[in-house]
Image (cartoon, grey):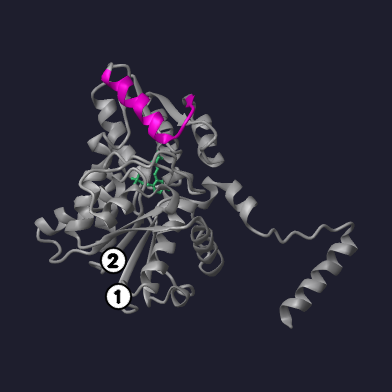
Amino acid sequence: MGEGGTPLIRLVNSNSILGVREVYVKFDGANPTGSFKDRGMTVAISIAKYIGVGIVACASTGNTSASMSAYASRAGIKPLIVLPKGRIARGKLVQAILHGAEIVLVKGGFDDALKVIIEASRRGLVYPLNSINPWRIEGQKTVAYEIVDEIGVPDWIVLPVGNAGNISAVWKGLVELKRAGLIDRLPRLVGVQASGAAPLVEMFRRGYRILKPVDNPETIATAIRIGKPVNWVRALRAVRESRGLFIDVSDNDIIGAQKILARHEGIGVEPASAAAIAGVAKLRKEGIIDRDERVVAIATGHALKDPDIILNHYNVRVHEASSIDNALSLIRKITLLNNS
Ligand code: AN7
């Protein structure tokens, strides 16, 4: 349905705020269902259809379930989704309803929902479409091809990390390009987590050998509110091999970065994606990224996915007019203020 081939947008105003001359946003919110998940879902659903699956299922913080519901519908397969109750952004839930998914809500978080899916697929009840399904990763790696096609190899690729499928996919794509002789060096990868849900950051910083899950992950970026990332082994290897790092950013920084992109660049991204931009700012502030290096931040999802975050965290500049004349006088005041 037109997944992939998303715009790589060079920042023209906010790069000076970030302190880096050449920053690009790979806007994967421009995919058919509004997130990067479509890249992998088109592949995995095609496989499911080929092998004759009747029902597909996933646990999700919202975007995987939205994407799976749409692509399953197109393939004529029944979508079933397991969601953490009360923790799904409204736009994503609406998409699952729109595309006719059967919805199972569980108490707890994403990690509990995933347990249900793993057990259901073990019992042969459903075909799982979480990123434990390798075909998802095969599709998602194409984002690396597109970045390299357009600007060559950047110095850094920065992206949000939840279950750590995407960072593993990006690295796989890059390594395969190098193995094929199409590029001769590799970028450094940075995985950004929200401070309240940052098991990989903790692991990286302290040099743990196995993952210590975060039991009650908490962040406004519900997409990456994940305490036990399934793909932690691959993700850690990707970051180590690329000489990159895992960092965390606060919820405040996430909203700040979302606002900067929205109001200085016209790019609307959901909170999890804004974490990548907040990550770039932090890396520059700490002197890890140089101002002359080329940086790509992957914006994984569209702002419309989570309207409530915007309504709750932004000052709304609404002027209530009592009549047409009153509206015109309000407009006159606003234009006067704006011109002074
Ligand atoms: C916008 O939809 O896990 O590190 O169930 O929706 O590959 O998990 C979503 C994750 C980043 C993190 N940005 O990617 C789900 C889900 C957005 C996301 C991530 C997600 P991974």
Q: Which element type, helix, strand or loop, lies under badge 1?
A: loop
* Nearest the eye: 126 or 232: 232
Q: Is residue 221 left or right of residue 164?
A: right
| Res. 6 mark | none
Tag 2 residue: 156
Magenta-span inclusion, residue 105: yes
The amino acid at mark 1 is: Glu
Q: Which residue range is magenta in the image?
A: 104-122
Where is residue 301 drawn, in percent x and y? 44, 50
Residue 320 location, x and y as percent? 82, 57
Identify residue for label 1.
Answer: 293
Mark 2 element type: strand
Picture coordinates of residue 293, whole percent (x, y): 30, 75
Disc 1 CB within 8 Å of nearest ligand 1 atom: no
Find residue 185 and report its image quarter.
bottom left
Query: Relative to residue 286, is residue 218 drawn left or right?
Result: right
Residue contact at pointers 1 and 2, CB within 8 angstroms = yes
**Position of 332 relative to 266 (above/below):** below
Q: Quadrant of ligand 1?
A: top left
Confirm whether the magenta stretch covers residue 123.
no
Is residue 191 at least partly visible in the picture?
yes
Q: Quadrant of residue 130?
A: top left
Q: Report the side of 308 relative to 75 (left or right).
A: right
